Image (cartoon, rainbow, N blue to C red):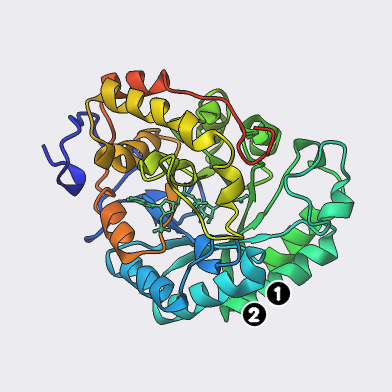
Amino acid sequence: MRCGAGISLGMTTPAPTTTEHPTGGMFRRPLGKTGLRVAEIGYGAWGIGGAQWIGAKDAQSTRALERYLALGGNFIDTALAYAEGHSERLVGEVARRNPGTVLASRVPPKNRVWPAQSGSRVQDVFPGEYLIESTVASLNNLGLDTLDVQQLHVWDDSWLGQGDWQDAVTQLKQGGKVKHFGISINDHQPDNAVKAVEAGAVQTVQVIYNVFDQTPRDRLLDACRANGVGVIVRVALDEGSLTGHITPETTFDAGDWRNMYFGGGRRQELQPRLRAIEQDLGVSTAQLPETALRFVLSHPAVSTVIVGMRSVRNVERNAALADGRGLSDSQLQKLYAHRWDRNWYSPAG
Ligand SMILES: NC(=O)c1ccc[n+]([C@@H]2O[C@H](COP(=O)([O-])OP(=O)(O)OC[C@H]3O[C@@H](n4cnc5c(N)ncnc54)[C@H](OP(=O)(O)O)[C@@H]3O)[C@@H](O)[C@H]2O)c1
């Protein structure tokens, strides 16, 4: 049996039926019904913006992006809001040198409120004209004429059929500026997009799914599978906690947003949860990232997992996992027990 990254996790699950082997490099899966085939391991470009993840160096980020593509990766997720377009500019520079790269970006909410507030009006958050302007700004940053996937950066299912955002999407597609459209679902609210998925309003969704937050398994992933909607998983490593590298002693630079996410007693609270996973699965701390990524990729609805990786080293480690292999049923059953419902994006938790 072939094991990714040389680590034996006892994987027996056959490759999900949605995978196919490309000519080399990373396994690719269909992105819903878009006709695109994307590498199982995608590249999440929030961190390389450098505004909230402090410490990113452009030259290092560019090397990491280039290495990702050289290893057979072909899917990069960025957003206009990431350092006011800086992430998009870095991604665009590399993508222009590597034709065939599939790019996704996002329209920030006009009112700059993350996540979408229940009761808010879509016309205040994503008026059609703003959606078009924002897309043009992203294309200028990327230095490209067309975006493969444009997404709304926040979403509320009550917005379906409201406002003029859907007319703007049609206009963007007809004008060739956008090929496919999706939504990035609010943190830890996967059910708050099921209506949009079932209505066929979007071709892709982006959602948090990891060993701790397993809520997408309740409804969303099945709905996506049934409706041919591509699933882009974000935060599979829980912003780094599931790498095992966050310890009670870990510190972050001033201004780094993770001071909040891992603030207070959270770094301590994490440790027994991680040790319990290691014990149940019989893995070492060093094997946690592989366990966490393979957990996500074991679900057949998942098209790709976009991992934040500012370093070449992490790109290489994760690229080695894109081999179409999932975890065994017994490993998955054990991991299902480690669900942990909480919201660390809120200071209240
Ligand atoms: N609302 C939204 O739409 C939204 C919100 C959050 C994220 N996102 C998207 O999702 C992407 C992924 O989320 P994220 O970057 O926030 O978090 P993440 O992927 O859960 O975790 C990223 C962290 O894991 C580290 N890492 C990656 N691979 C590793 C490995 N093999 N071993 C050890 N450490 C490893 C990274 O280190 P280095 O970076 O130092 O290499 C980084 O510190 C973002 O980049 C962004 O594109 C979207």
| Residue at mark 1 to residue at mark 2: CA–CA distance | 6 Å
Looking at the rendered image, the quarter that the C terminus falls into is: top right
Direction from residue 335 to residue 120 in the image, left or right: right
Q: Residues within 10 Å of mark 2 (few under 14, many from 20)?
A: some
Numbered circle sitting on residue 243: none
Numbered circle sitting on residue 136: 1
Tell me which residue sits at (36%, 49%) in the image: 40
- Residue 172 screen position, x and y as percent: 71, 66
Which amino acid type is marked by label 1?
Val
Look at the numbered discs 1 and 2 and tell me whether their residues touch, using CB distance below 8 Å.
Answer: yes
Which residue matches tag 2? 140
- Residue 56 screen position, x and y as percent: 48, 68
Q: Residues within 10 Å of mark 1 (few under 14, many from 20)?
A: some
Tell me which residue sits at (65%, 48%) in the image: 183
Which amino acid type is marked by label 2?
Asn
Residue 241 sits above or below residue 275 on the image: below
Depth check: give the residue in front, 179 or 75: 75
Tell me which residue sits at (24%, 60%) in the image: 25
Label 1: which secondary element:
helix
Depth check: give the residue in front, 254 or 158: 254
- Residue 131 screen position, x and y as percent: 77, 63
